[in-house]
Amino acid sequence: MLALRSSLRAGTVCSPMTGRYSLPHNFARTRGSPWVTRSNGFHSIISASNPIPNKSIQDLLVLSKTLQGNTGIINSTAPRKQTTAADFLTLMSQMILVGSTAFLLFCAASPHTVSDKLEEYKEQTKIRRHARMLEFMTSDRTYVNGDLGVSEESSDGSSLMFQGQIYHPEIAKDIQGVLFKGPILRYGILTGPAGSGKSKLIRTLVKDEPHYAVLSMGLISGVKSLVDALSEEVGYDFDDWTERMLQGYLFNGNTVTFPTQLDKLAFLLDEIEEASWKLKFDSKSNNSMKRPIIVLDDIDRLDLTQHDMQLAVRMLFNSASKWAREDTALVVFAMGSSALLSETGEIAKLIRPEVLDIAKVYNVSYLQQSEADRFLRDRMGEQLAADRMIVQNVVGTRVFDLMAVCEEVVKTGDSTDAVLTRQLDQAAEHVYKGFSEMEYKFGEAKTRAVVRWLDSMAKSAVSGAPMSLHCFEDARRRGYGDAMKLLLQHDIIGAEGMFSSDLYRNAYRRYRNMALA
């Protein structure tokens, strides 16, 4: 490089092939372009007549790059580079940044306008959510009453289904004429022994109402499953992540979360109440006096030993009481007849008396003789009246027991006497095992005392016993409580302390060598 600079100062260039110095073409003297060279290097090279004095310096720089082997010349004819995904993402991020900045500036300039728009969006979201809930409770759900696949052209055995029949007409009339008719002033409670038909009755009645939801508590294991099942039945979707996310970030600063499942249940009950308000104050509704009906079936089957479940049940009853007093919605609970007894009833011990006093209680007992006869005719056909009477005398008039007899007669084709003999033999064997276990656990003396007490109960039919009679508490006072609990586990007696059905009462009479009554 020092040699190059020396050669440039001298006005010559050394050829790498010959080793000789020669004058570059750019420095050749041309006509009209005389050069004046001074002794102070190429900074002193000045063109005598060139109007651009720095032209010679530019030529020297080009020559220097050429001699150093620099070939990075841009080719203008090269193909244009294609846009990649990274370029697209960069563009999008820039647009988002610009848009966010513009939105923030707009919010700073017009905060009231932005606040009004957000409130409007929040209100529209709430209205849409409640409308979806009411629409779902209006939809036809055939699984509610269990008569799936039943048609007028029914096949053999389909006559066993209820198909909308009602066998407690007086109670049904009162429920439809008082409880279901607005304005709502009380919530409802249906009590009765297991198998009396209270669940089938209320499910059949709500099918004719415009808005309803039915939830069975038989498979509820905790508060979480209770919330999930109830939200599904009323059409509320906790998993609508778009709505939850937008609402959370726009109005709360984070996503909507619930510290406990009880908080989630409280939120759901509040949503049901607001949806009911929408229906109540909707001027366009044709059912201005109709309220949503929510049936909570078998609520006494919940595990009330859990503290959170106890609080959840209290919340349900408190909500039912509040909605009834405000004519907002109607809640109907279905439970066993022992659940409301003052001393041993789980619901009675859990719910405040002033809350229970608002409820209208219906005792759904065994069928009347005329209704039991109609029940048998609807499922077994026009059998002899004597055969239908024998069925009632042996198994009683409980819906579940009558259905069991009808099922075997229709499906097996056996005679009524053969079916009744088979069922009575099975029940008698069950009774024998239960009392044998009692004698083994509590001794012969206590077993004899319990048997003597049950002999007096076996004289009268279970179907005709008053619902207010609670023999279980009487047995507990006599010291037979533990023995009666054993019989309750074997389904020989019911939760009220009486025989679970006339079938087991007659089986006990056979066990004691008494004549069937």
Image (tube, rainbow, N blue to C red):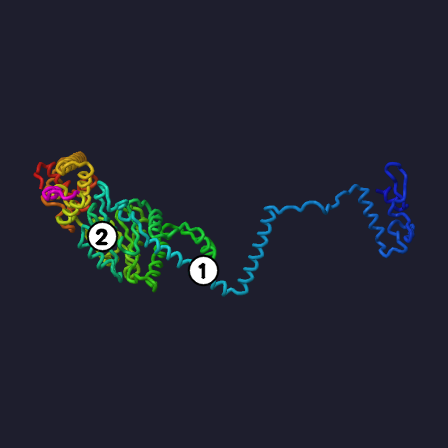
Mark 2 vs mark 1, CA separation in Å: 42 Å
Residue at figure coordinates x 87%, y 45% from the top left: 25
Element carrying mark 1: helix
- Which residue, given by chain and number where applicable, does mark 2 sit on? 190
Q: Which residue is drawn at 14% across and 50% down?
A: 466
Query: In the displayed structure, does residue 457 sit left or right of residue 68?
Result: left
Task: Residue 381: say if magenta.
Answer: yes
> In which quadrant is the N terminus drawn?
top right
- Label drawn at residue 121: 1
Amino acid identity at mark 1: Tyr
The amino acid type found where label 2 is placed reads Leu
Viewer-closest of 432 and 450: 432
The magenta stretch is 380-391
Q: Position of 398 compared to 146: left or right?
A: left
Q: What element carries label 2?
A: strand
Location of the C terminus (image quadrant): top left
Residue found at the far front of this picture: 153
